[in-house]
Image (cartoon, helix red, strand yellow):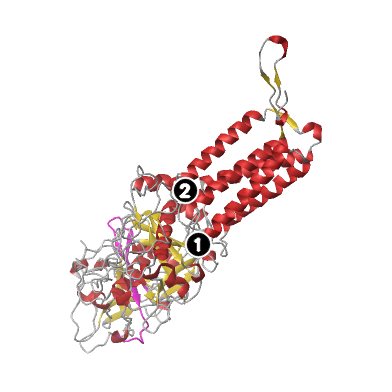
Amino acid sequence: MAYPGGMTVDTGGGSGTTILRSEMSLVLFGGLASMEAGAVHAAAAGIHAEHRQLAQLFIVIAALQLGVGLWAVVRSSRAAAWAVVGVNAAAIAGWLYTRLAGLSWIEGLEVREAPQFADTACALLAAVAVFAAYTGAILPPERRQQRGLVIPAVVLGMFAVWTMLAAGTHVHSHEAEAADGHSHGTEEVADAGHAHGTEEAAADGAAAAEAVDAGASDMEASDVGEGHAHTAEESAAEDGHVHIIDPAAAPPAEPAALAWPRPWDPTQPVDLSGVPGVTAEQQLRAMKLVDDTLAALPRFADPADAIAAGYSSIGDAGTGSEHFIKADLIEDDDLLDPLAPESLVYSVENGQRTLAGAMYIASARPADDPSLTEWAGPLMTWHKHDNLCWSVDENGAAKVVGIIDANGNCANGVRTGGANPMVHVWIQPHPCGVFAALEGIGAGTAGVPEDQRVDVCSAEHDHGTTAPAAPAAVAKPYDPTLPIDLSGTPGVTPQQQAAAENLIAVTLVELPQWSDYRVAEAAGFKSIGDAGTGHEHFVQWDWIEDDVILDPNYPESLVYEPQPDGSKKLVSAMYMTASSIALEDVPNIGGDLMQWHIHNNLCYSGWPEHPRVSGITSPNGACPTGFVNPPPAPMIHVWIVPQECGPFAALEGVGAGQIEAGAERLCDTAHGGH
């Protein structure tokens, strides 16, 4: 007796033995695979019922795959084979496109989707159908029958059933289980697991980064409200956590107003609930962005991997947070893409870098552009950095070389980068929230008043509830081996604190290029012969009267500490302005943390070829014959070793120089180190 596919049963010989001949038409095999792919699409239509267009699309694809598959099974002709190839190739092409870009005209596919288990398995079945049917179509009829296909056909069928079960176990349209319309259980609660353990993040990060696609990318203002929820296979297979959210579910009539921002702990479920003015769609998008960032970003945990991917440091490690930027991603069309973050942020302590978060940078536009402000609503504040001075190193990489002065000018480098808004997403705990900006000058400027920012910690505004007052900052001793913290000085604004910290940070990073005094001498520095005081100053006299200040690549003076073995240890920069600048007109970048001084009573011999300090002026302000008292230039130290009177301390005694008339000598013991 013959059966479709060439399978025969031979009961001859009187033995009663049944013999199966394992032959099957390649076209029939392709038809079976097409029908199985169609069955998976049909199952997927049910779990995407909340997206009517998407569900209808799945039904159409399922009908086509089932139809051409049935044709190939019933009549394994060349025409049926080509029909299987055409329908399934089109299905594969559509799947690939939606993994690379969104389809704004189909509800549920507005943003690109991550390749997950169910849809990848469905595409695999379609690929098998294409290969088998195409091979059967091009072979002569006598070669279309192939041995050994029966068992693969059975296995393929079992795989399809398993795929449908995996897709069908996810409840795609959820009931709101909490006030915010979602619940977060553990991995053991049916498909609602949402645990972000640090070990889980570390273990899953690298693997997930290859499979998780940034569903939040390419979303502009037109995308409002169409975030695509995670399916069970999307979330559980990738990173083990699923959000139970129905974006169409009506929020509670009067939701409780909860404080925002609130402390962020990635080991706990993401909680963006109860924030006034945030829509369900905005909340869903923001939660997906956090989830995807947690999953994808750890592939850059090793800075070497970031560098290999094209990122380069901007040279701000001394601040305690080092930014690596990939410049060619900034002006592209992607927005908030965890697979292509414009900047990576590492926390730096004792020379060790730990990946702390992403800094997503938008193409040039206002910080209050609706494409940004409407993306997550009151959950995010976008900010800019328009007060930084940038240059490039010998490799062409961008580096921060300072900040603008009171007149908005850069002493070194150029003022740029202020046109691009940015926002952080932290994968490490942060007291000011998952989208917090850095403190002080690192917070940049926003498109809203400072008291309306939701990306900074502040006791002055509570965003819906009364928050406890923040404890007073306690001053910490200055230790150049630790993240710089100059907090705790009354009267110092966050901007002044950050500017002072930034100056120290840049100095710590760049000044060691002059550690060998012989390198300094080769660059034109000359000792003024004061090693006997315990500190020897090497001065580059040509740099004093230029227009460059506070630049460790062009320091006017270097301070070395003579060592018992005769060597010299670099301990400080002494930055100087031009002598035409009066003490009362020096850059006030650090407020009460910094005090400039001059030396108007020193007499130099060997002027101008080899100036050396040889004494001080007489009471009438004159130097002995043959000695020169040059015009005084305001100066300030930045120490790269601890000092009793803080990181900007002057020397003691005659080395302290003269300060502004009527001012009190500053000794910052609060930040002093011994």
Query: Label 1: how many residues lie within 10 Å, few (<14), some (14-19) or many (20+)?
Result: many
Three-letter amino acid code of the residue under disc 1: Ser
Residue range (magenta)? 556-582
Residue where numbered disc 1 is placed: 217
Tell me where residue 3 appears, x and y as whole percent: 70, 28
Residue at x-position 63% and y-position 49%: 63
| Res. 596 in view | yes
* Discs 1, 2 touching: Cβ within 8 Å: no
- Residue type at mark 2 is Ala
Quarter of the picture holding the C terminus: bottom left
Q: Tell me residue 618's x, y (percent).
A: 22, 85
Secondary structure of the residue carrying tag 1 is loop
Front residue of 228 and 315: 228
Residue projecting furthest to the bottom: 620
Decide if residue 42 is on the left or right side of residue 414: right
Cα separation, mark 1 vs mark 2, equals 17 Å
Left or right relative to 459: residue 34: right
Residue count near mark 2 (Cα–Cα under 10 Å), binned few <14, some 14–19, many ≥20? many
In this rendering, is residue 28 above or below 384?
above
Q: Position of residue 100 (x, y in %)?
A: 57, 57
Q: Which mark is residue 208?
A: 2
